[in-house]
Image (cartoon, rainbow, N blue to C red):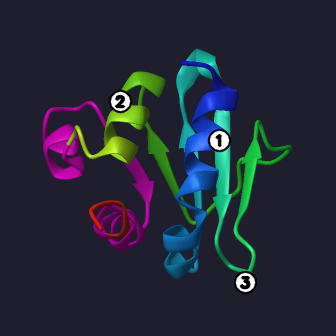
Amino acid sequence: MSLDKIVAEMQKQAEKLKELHHTVLFDLGDDGKVLLDATTPEVKIVPNPDSDEAETTLVLSSENMIKLMNGDLNPMVAFTMGRLKVFGSKGIALKLSSLLDQ
């Protein structure tokens, strides 16, 4: 799936993602990166940001990213199976997981 489609899907979920109040970088390998900045009232979703700086970085394939956003892949299972790697705050990753489950 293209990076544009992933960004569009994230923007659909921006209302609930603003409750995160943190920054998360999604590293999708060769497909690119997406920065989710929920530190301001208006959630910013930036494809291929200039900086990789974020409180938490999640490394996964774009295919698994879509599955996570659609609820077709449990984040804890993905982490346990090595399909999702978390760098930085694990607490932020857990909070993001709970928001996506809503």
Let me know if residue 86 is in the magenta part: yes
* Relative side of 87 to 81, left or right: right
Residue type, mark 1 in image: Ala
Q: Residues within 10 Å of mark 1 (few under 14, many from 20)?
A: few
Q: Residues within 10 Å of mark 3 (few under 14, many from 20)?
A: few
Label 3, label 2: how far apart the Cα atoms are: 28 Å
Please name whichever residue, 94 or 53, is drawn nearer the observer in this view of the structure. Answer: 94
Work out which residue is located at the far front of the displayed protein and give it.
12
Query: In the image, which is nearer the foreground, mark 1 or mark 2?
Result: 1
Residue type, mark 3 in image: Pro
Is residue 94 positioned above or below 28 on the image? below
- Rendered image: mark on residue 64: 2
Q: Return the residue at label 3.
A: 41
Find out whether the residues at labels 3 and 1 contact each other: C-beta distance under 8 Å.
no
Label 3, label 1: how far apart the Cα atoms are: 19 Å
Q: Earlier in the sequence, mark 1 or mark 2?
A: 1
Q: Secondary structure at mark 3?
A: loop
The residue located at (58%, 54%) in the rendering is 12
Q: Secondary structure at mark 1?
A: helix
Residue 18 x, y percent position in the rendering: 58, 75
The magenta region covers 74-98
Residue type, mark 2 in image: Asn
Q: Return the residue at label 1.
A: 8
The residue located at (42%, 36%) in the rendering is 65
Q: Earlier in the sequence, mark 3 or mark 2?
A: 3
